[in-house]
Every structure is written in structure tokens, then in C-alpha cells.
Image (cartoon, rainbow, N blue to C red):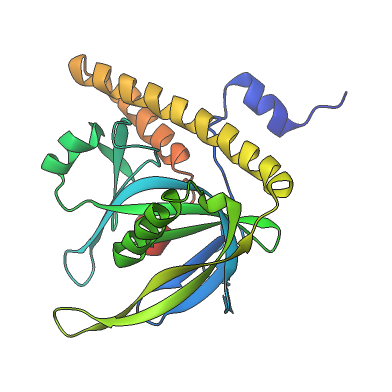
Amino acid sequence: MTYSKDSLKKLSGGDKVRTTYKVPTIKFNGNTGIFTKFPVGDYKNGTDITDVELIILRSRRAFTSFEKIDTKTTLRMFTNEHNSYNDPLTVFEAKTGANIKVVGSGSIETLRVEFPQLRINSNLYCLYEDQVYKLTIRGKSRQSLVDKQKELAKDDKEFFEHTVKLSPKQETASGGNMYYFLEYEITGDSDLEKIGPHMEDIAKVMDTMDKEYTETNKRIVNETKDPASDDDEEEEEELMVDDVDASSVTADELKPEEIPF
């Protein structure tokens, strides 16, 4: 057996190990109606794609907000991914010129009172070109997805049983601005034997991440009751950055579409 510095660093406890799930992404631009796919961890060198047809393997919830405070300062808030309304959440804040930090923890019912600007997104983990991609949808695109899911449920069907074509539709907002949202067309049946291993892999990672966030929330609650020392607080901030897989991203660089959840 051979040893490397990186492997021994993990064993020494000098490198925090947190579960992440890094996959390529597909972005949908609501202003232009264009899809762009990006390699893992790269949100700059994308390739525009059309006629997007995929299989939705799993949907996860997350809450986000974006506010431009002035010409030089933006404030972004986001939560960890989760499965249901009842799951405990951690809220992170990324502000221009500042480190990413934890600003809240608890149920979404409580957090929405403290942070009313938070809006729900769905992160869809999909099989596209035989590879798992993540697609984030919000607003009317998300509502359209919920409507299609209800339609399938009437026939006891699930999204993962079908291939789905994503179709951008243009609409005028109440303020007069034009935007695009997604509609979902069932185009065929999926191969359950083919998608099963992908769904198992996703589930294992997500279950582990959820357990870690449950422990994180418990720790934050306990530290609120019994404040930590300055050294502990510094360590916690580093841990939170690792948790969201954003240790190499500064708040200056962080864009709304680049939040890792």
C-alpha cells in the first residue's frame, strides 16, 4: 500500500472531510430562454444546447435570495438542499467583500419569518446524455413542474419513469417585462434498469449530506445556548464554507446562478 500526503492529511484530521456531490450543470436563462451546460465546478465555459430531453431522477429543495444593495455590494442568501418542509435548514450569507457565513438555523417556518426574502428553488438531478446533471428551476418553471407531477400522479406515474422534453415558453410579467419559463412534455419511457444505479448513487450521497446537516444544525443550536470561544467560531466558519463546497469562492465572485445548491 502506498500513501500520499493528501490521504494522510485526511487521516491526521488536518483536512476537513465533508460530503459533496459534484456533477455538471445545465443552466436555464429565464431572460433569453437558452440552455447552457457546464462541466463540473465550471460556471464560465459553458456550451449552449437545444432540444433538451432528459430523465428527472430526483428533485431537491433549497431556498435562496439575491439583493443588490448598491453598485458595489450584493447580498446572497441560501440554504442547504433538503427533501421536505419539515427538514432542518442552515442559512448562509454571501456578501460582497466578506466571507460566507452562517446566519440562521432551524425550520423553514421559523426562518421565513426572519428572512422573508427567501424563495424556494428545485434542484433537479437528471440523466442527460448518459450522465447525471443538476438543473435548478424556480418561479413559474417550478410551478409548471409541480403541475406536471400532479398530472402524472393521477395515473400513479413518476417522473423517473419517463423521458421529458424541456420547452421554453415566453410570457409577459405584470410589469411588462418578457421572460421565459419551462414546460415539461413526456416523450417516452425510461429504462429502469439503466437509471436505477444512478438513483442509488444519488440517494446515498444525499442521505449522508442530510445527516451531516442535521448534526450541523444541532451544533449551531447548542453553540447559541453556550457561545463558543473566538477560536471555535473561526473554525465553524471554515467548516460551513466547506459544507457548501465554496471554499475557493469569495463573495465578490459569487453570482446568483453559481450557488452550489
Q: What is the residue that sits farthest to the left in this orientation? A: 113
Quarter occupied by residue 102: top left
Image position of 171 (left or right of 81): left
Image position of 48 (left or right of 150): right
* Quadrant of the snapshot with the N terminus: top right
Image position of 11 (left or right of 37): right
| Residue 88, x across and y down, in percent | 31, 30
- Of residues 104 and 37, the one nearer the viewer is 37
Image position of 222 (left or right of 210): left
| Residue 17, x across and y down, in percent | 56, 30
Q: Is residue 246 above or below residue 44?
A: above
Q: Is residue 27 above or below residue 151?
A: below
- Of residues 259 and 94, the one nearer the viewer is 259
Q: Is residue 222 above or below residue 142?
A: above
Residue 173 visible in the current orientation:
yes
The residue lying at 59 percent from left, 63 percent from top is 54
The residue lying at 29 percent from left, 56 percent from top is 97
